[in-house]
Amino acid sequence: MNRAAAAVDRRVAPPWPALGALGACVITGAALVMIGPIVGPAVVGLLGILLLIRRPGIGLAVLLVSTVLFEDDPFGFLPITARFYEGPPSINEVVMATAAVGLLLDLGIRHRVPILPEPFTLPLALLGLAFVAGTVNGHFQQGDFSEVLWVMRPIGYMVLVSFLVVNLLGDRRKVWLFAAGAALLAVFKGIEGMVFWVLGTGRPLEEGGAFAGTVLTYYEPTANFIMLLFLLAGAGALMMRVPLPLWIKLTSPVVLAALVLAFRRNFWIALCLGFLLTIMLTSGIRGRRLVFPTMVVLLASIWIAISAGGVSYVQGPLVERAQTLAPTKLDARKQDAYRLQEVKNVLLELKNHPIAGLGLGVPWSAVDNPLPEEHDGGRFYTHVVVLHYWLKFGLLGLAAYLWLMAVAILTAIRIWRFSDGDWFKVAGLATATGLVGLMVAETTGSYTGVDYRFSVIMGAVIGWLAAARVHAIPSRTLASAPTPADPAG
């Protein structure tokens, strides 16, 4: 049967099979409700797992969308969503596992060789080696093995999700739809955050005083990073004179307001840095003339971020928060003093263990630099991400993090420069400047490979970059097949 006949057959095919399947689903659902409140949901969950295994792309979409939508903040405006991550195994982990099993089965059925997330394979492999070294080192230092398991989760998520994404984004259209879906999620998070901010529901800025009742939009880094990329993409499109769709024009102010009202100083700095880098990169300046202003902007951003102290605990209104960016405002802030003392203690530990670090499960000491306050598990955490990798995994971990981020930024720049679609260029530029901003933000908060929600999203970014490198750059696709039209138009 030729294609035309097949198309006609599909158009005139009777609707009875579809209606029958729908009726069967309704009857099955009613029967499950009648069975009971425990057996019914269990059967539905089993059927859902089977569906995700059979359709790994749906499983990946459910994983990424739910990770972005459901905040793990028991003090946020929807504290019930934090139950999504309770475990192990959490619902999030079950979805991830089913997507992975589904992909492996699909590869086996189709006799396809798995695609590695190039050029990130070696940096990720080095990160895995550093994890093994940190585990062994921590074992000989009598470290807490339970902390090893908690560190393994976000790193494993990041590696696994990058593998899933690059294998499921098999063509140019899927790569584009993935980026468009991320933009829609950013818009949703912006609107959601502003709605609950207007309602005054969420994590409060302070418990008392003149500004009691003021809340922030998002405490965790995942939503803030997604909104950051969206805003940088809009700025890049304006600078590159790419026409903006009406929905982006209408929603950008809302997303910007949601990011500002998150009161996260490190993401404010990342946004300003991203805007400056976008202006410089799109100005036409190339080569050596771009190096000096870029280094000045980067060093100034890092100095402001470190001098401005911490970002996790927020106290006060927007104007007061902005004023705390000045280093002279630090002494009055207890949380900022804690972070400065933490850095001193961590640097002292690294001076004593410069090669292998402390290892996993070994807390850093605060004997020489007493802390103004203690946090549960705080001795296992470091707010400066490069110090975190160095302290936990030694020089191998530090090299793995820097290598991974450098490869990601350079790959994004390559997509911006060499892809043939305007919106692929916009997405590449936004990712490059956003990742540079993220590295500056992580001088006061460790997220990549540390926060498990953020690590899922970071794995998705890595996988998207690996797929876009192949499918969005004509020089890598014309050799095998004609490049399809740009879905962005």
Image (cartoon, rainbow, N blue to C red):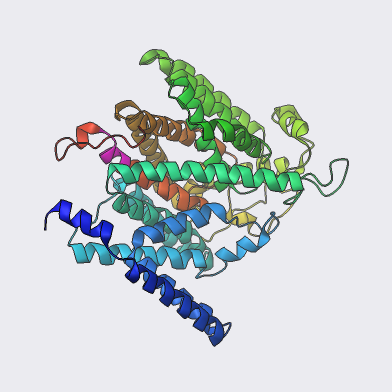
Q: Is residue 163 visible?
A: yes
Q: Nearer the viewer, residue 302 or 227?
A: 227
Q: Which residues are magenta?
A: 468-473
List x then y, in percent, for residue 61: 42, 55
Magenta-highlighted stretch: main secondary structure?
A: helix
**Residue 28 sits above or below residue 185 on the image:** below
- Name the residue: 30% across, 30% down: 419
Residue at the extreme left: 1
Q: Position of residue 336 (x, y in %)?
A: 71, 40
Question: Which quarter of the picture shows residue 135?
Answer: bottom left
- Residue sitting at the far right: 210
Q: Closest to the observer: 138 or 192?
A: 192
Q: Dividing the picture into quarters, in which one does residue 417 lie?
A: top left
Asked if residue 240 lies left or right of residue 213, the reply is left
Q: Is residue 441 left or right of residue 179?
A: right
Is residue 185 left or right of 156 when viewed as pictured? right
Closest to the observer, 336 or 396 = 336
* Viewport quadrant of the N terminus: bottom left
Could you tell me residue 242's position as x and y percent?
A: 43, 24
Determine the residue positioned at 63% across, 42% down: 344
- At horizontal 56% and vertical 37% (from top left) the residue drawn is 441
The answer to whether residue 383 is visible is no
Residue 477 in magenta stretch: no
In the rendered image, the vertical position of residue 285 relative to residue 310, given as above or below = above
Q: Indicate whether 189 appears above or below 295.
A: below
